[in-house]
Structure formats: C-alpha cells, structure tokens
Amino acid sequence: MNSYSDVWKLVLERLRTKLSETTVNTWFDEVDVVTMEDSAFVLHCGNTFKRDIIETRFAKEIKSSLKDIFTADLEVKILDDDQLSAYHGVRPDRPDDPQGSDGFTFETFVIGPQNKLAYAAARAVAESPAAGKKQRNPLLIYGDSGLGKTHLLYAIYNLHRKLFPEQKIVYIKGDDFINDYVALVRTQRGEELRAKYRDANLLLVDDIQFLSNTDHAQVEFFHTFNALHEVGNQIVLTSDRPPQEMTMLHDRLRSRFMGGLMVDVKQPDYETRLAIIKNRAAFLGLNLSERNSIYIAENVTSNVRQIEGALNKIAAFRDLEVTDDMDEEAISRAIEDMLKRDNDFIPSPAVIIRQVCKYYGVDEDTVRGKNQGRDATNARQVSMYLIRRMTPLSMEDIGKEFGDRDHSTVHYSLQKVEKQMRTDTAFAETVKSLTTNINARQ
C-alpha cells in the first residue's frame, strides 16, 4: 500500500462484500481520506447528510474492514467541510447552507416527463446564471405541494455554491421574507434588510405565494427584485400556482414573475414513482424486491413527499421489527394509512375542519355545532365547501359532520362560497391557500 487512498480502496472492496454495490456507490461516492493518525482513520465527506448516515449506520463496517487490514482496532473520524477546514487551520468563508439541504442535489433528483423541463431549467441557472440570459430570469417553478420544487431549489444552491464559491447566495422562504421585513423595518433597520437581499448574486425564494398576503412586504420585494434584475443577478422562485392565479399579488410583481421562464412540475407518473422508490430505498439501505417496489409505486401515488414518507415508514418498521424480510404484507402494514384510495389521497373531514378553524380562530366544536356567529358561520361554510370539493362525501354525509344539518343547508353553503369566490378575490385567495395547506398535511 502506497498511500492512505490505497487503504480506503481496500476498505471499499471489503464493504462491497457486506453491502450492495448500490449502497456503497450511493453513500461513499463523496468520501475521501484525510490522514491516518495513531489510533484513528480520518475521512472527509462534505455532504453532511451522507456523513451522518455513514457515522450512524456504516462506521462499524468500516472499523471492521480496517481491523482486517491492520489487525488492530482503529477509530473512524468523518469530517464535514467546516471540520476539515478547522483540521487544516483554515476558517471557512461561505454562506450557511439552508438547513437540511445537503441531501438535495441534481444527482438525487429523479427525472420524469412531469419535471424534465423544470430540472433542465434549474440546472441551467445553477451552472450559468442570469447574466446575458434574461429570458430565464426570473426562473419560476410552480406546482402542488410535495412534487420536488424545494429539492430543485436546494440543488441550485448546492451546485452554484460549488461552482461559484465566491458569490453570495441567499435562500429564503416567502413567509420568512415577510418576517424579516416586519422585524427590521418596524425597528427602523430597513437598510439591513436591503443589504441582506440586494447584494445577492443568486436569490432563491421558496413559496413566493405567501408574499401575496402582505402589501408592504410586496413593495419591498418589488424593489429588491428590480435591484437584482437590473444588474443581471439571478432570481429563482417557487410557488404552488402560476402568477396569474395569485389574485392578491400586485400587478407589477405578477408581470415581473411572468417575464422570465415559468416551468411547472406535476404528479409523478408510474415509471418516475418506481425510480424514486428505488433511489430512496438505496439511500435508506432498504432491500426491496422488484415486486415490492412495484407494489408501492402502484399504491402510493400522490406526490414525491408521500413516496419518500412511505419509504421512511418502511425503514422505521424494519428497524422496529429488527428484520430485513419486508414482504408485501409487512409493507402493507407499515404504510396502510398512506395507501391510495380511489387513486388519490383524500383528506378527512376532520383534517379540513381543523385547518379552517385554525385560520378563522374558532373552536372545532363551535363550527360543528349551532353557533351562528360570523366567524363560526364563515368557517362552517368554507369547511363544507372544501369537504365537498376534496372528498367523495355526499351533501347528506357532509351535513352529518355539522350536527346533522340537512341537504338544503349544505347546498346553500356551497352556493354562497362559490358566489363569494367569484366576486371577492381576497376570499378566493383564502380558499386557495387553505386548500394548499390541507394538501400539504396529508
């Protein structure tokens, strides 16, 4: 052996006799050797998500392989980027990652016909941002909750930081931008807010639709958008809907959002779901048969987040049962509450009522009862409308959820909500936001 790298190659060879090739390639592709100390073998993995998994699940196998090679017990240290810099006496000078973003890269994003254009556009702006390419600035990625929009935003962040480490990248959620605005402007520190966002080379805003809830924050974002756009700095936005459906968004912001490249992501098809399942299973060290992968793909159909949640539950079930033998029956028991009903996930009336009551600030028992107060009546009518729209319940069944109200009362509530949505844009936006929130909590 001529180097520590040779030792690591031998370790990987031994790991392949204990783990699958996919597992080794997935988890150890970003690991390299730093040194070997008196009693420790020191590795580096810049992907902290993978680093944590290696430490918790594979450190024992690495130690065992090292003992086979050296006939001695060695500890294993795995350093992240900051720890490696500290090890070499260098202080890192880069923006903090968005929390939990490490595992979300273009390599771990499963491409299908429903997201191919969004993937290509996201990768393009990460590799070659806006300067001279105004047709894709801003880039706006829209679609329902759980379809991979945030994954693409994180992937842009991670790749751009790697390619352009000297540039300033700012990631923010739409509601956090509002919180920043309120906290800094009301304390007369508006310049801090402007410095934070308007100096960015790349601005990433997740869930921009939340901005439509606040007029003053929209004005501030309008000026931030213009400041960045005029100097050719890239802006990437995600939303649960296209700008033309954001009825509370100021016209001048809507036109700017529509002035770049808009791409959507849709519900994954069967082939994409199957690929996601196999990819996620490899990440979790799940040994799923082809038949079991197909079973999950055919029965968990809502969105990417639901699929990943199902695989996480299966992994947890495996660990609790202390078994690797996950047959179809065991998998069904692990994810029985997530299996499709009539090809879709349907929120229960209780979930819908809970979310509506939370928005209106009223008690669920009050809404289900006979109280005729304004807030209770509004919450009751909106709840009836959403239950009718989002579930297969009949109007008679809906009436039973609200103290055995009759068919005509439910029908009147549905008509009233539909009429108000046509004439009151703020109310229509509220119903749309409630729908999004309910879907996100399935």
Image (spheres, rainbow, N blue to C red):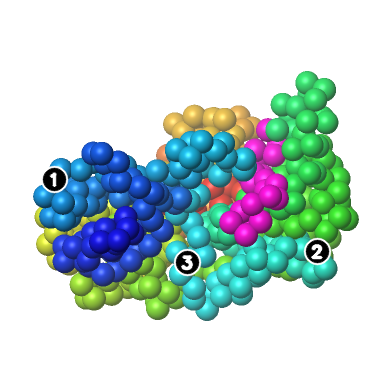
Frontmost of labels 2 and 1 is 1
Give the residue at x 79% y 56%: 233
Contact between marks 2 and 1 (CB within 8 A): the answer is no
Mark 2 Cα shell of 10 Å, populated few (<14), some (14-19), many (≥20): some
Q: Is residue 298 above or below residue 442?
A: below
Q: Position of residue 168 (x, y in %)?
A: 70, 47
Q: Position of residue 435 (x, y in %)?
A: 56, 52
Mark 1 Cα shell of 10 Å, populated few (<14), some (14-19), many (≥20): few
- Quick one: quadrant of the N terminus? bottom left
- Of the residues shown, which amino acid type is indicated by label 1? Ala
- Of the residues shown, which amino acid type is indicated by label 3? Glu
Among numbered discs 2 and 1, the one appearing first in the sequence:
1
Q: Which residues are magenta?
A: 160-179
Left or right of residue 192: residue 23: left
- Of the residues shown, which amino acid type is indicated by label 2? Ala
Contact between marks 1 and 3 (CB within 8 A): the answer is no
Q: Position of residue 273 (x, y in %)?
A: 39, 71
Q: Position of residue 183 (x, y in %)?
A: 72, 26
Helix, strand or loop under label 2: loop
Quarter of the figure with residue 116:
bottom right
Task: Identify the residue position indicated by label 1 in the image.
Answer: 72
Give the residue at x 35% y 47%: 35
Give the residue at x 86% y 45%: 223
Task: Identify the residue position indicated by label 2 in the image.
Answer: 131
Helix, strand or loop under label 3: loop
Gap between marks 1 and 3 measured at Cα: 37 Å
Quarter of the figure with residue 2:
bottom left
Frontmost of labels 1 and 3 is 1
On residue 107, the disc is 3
Does the magenta segment cover residue 417?
A: no
